[in-house]
Image (spheres, grey):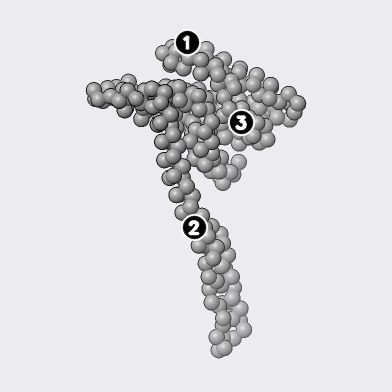
Amino acid sequence: MTGKRFKTIAFDGLLKNNPTLRLVLGTCPTLALSTAAFNGIGMGLAVTFILICSNVLISLLRKTIPNAVRIPAFVIIIATFVTIVRMVLDKFIPSLYDSMGVYLPLIVVNCIILGRAESFASKNTVLDSACDGLFTGLGFTCALTLIGAVREILGAGAIFGYTLWDFKIEFFTSSAGAFFVYGLAIAIFNFIYSKAENARRKKTFDLRIMPRPDVSAPDNLDPEESEKAQAQADGAAETAKEVK
């Protein structure tokens, strides 16, 4: 994997194709489990682990799984890792296991994991698929934790279980509050992303239309000096193209 390829996968998973804030996938666990930042981290890390493992295994078997049964095969692979996560959480972090409730086993049919399996892991190498699972999962985790932190601070006056103040707005702990904060997060994220993307495109466009240096040789230059000046101008033009 080249450095450019790695940066592209990381940028797509975290920002450009953020599953929660850009593609609006995995909405059910986002709304239901974002009442607290800790729940968001727990669900996000569970999804990240399952994404990495399932992407790697699906990529390894991508030339073996028949096309006609690929979706059932993907579901079985994902369900295997979901079962492992459920057993580990039930044994070592029972409070998080209880807070996730039915949404933990429902990861099996989570559209984020199935979507990455179908659109990426089944068509790319193992290393690329592992990186895609990692950064897509981290993008989901960051979004879920951010929404959970906002709702916990405003709705419970606390963060990660630690009380900050007695002031509470119970609206933010309700279902309506979940939709409100989620929608606001999507709007703010996409506004900032669009502004940054427009600025990048404008910079690229300005570089493309950069005027070519005037290299018309004076009459008193001999042919050798004129050829040297032309070569320097061509080099400057190539450099301007590479900057983009």
Decide: few, some or many residues near mark 3? Use Cα within 10 Å; few <14, some 14-19, many ≥20.
some
The quarter of the displayed image where residue 191 is located: top left
Residue count near mark 2 (Cα–Cα under 10 Å), binned few <14, some 14–19, many ≥20: few
Element type where label 1 sits in the image: helix
Q: Which residue occupies 73% across, 30% down?
A: 63
Work out whether residue 86 or residue 20 is closer to the camera in this orientation and state it.
20
Q: Quadrant of the N terminus?
A: top right
- Residue 147 figure quarter: top left
Q: Name the residue under label 3.
A: 115
Instruction: Kindly identify the residue that appears in the image at 65 percent across and 31 percent down.
Output: 118
On residue 91, the disc is: 1
Comes first in the chain, label 3 or label 2: 3
Residue 12 rendering spot, x and y as whole percentages: 54, 40
Say whether disc 2 or disc 1 marks the residue closer to the N-terminus: 1
Measure the alpha-carbon separation of dots 2 and 1: 53 Å
Which numbered tag is attached to residue 202? 2
What x and y, as percent, mark residue 202?
Answer: 49, 57
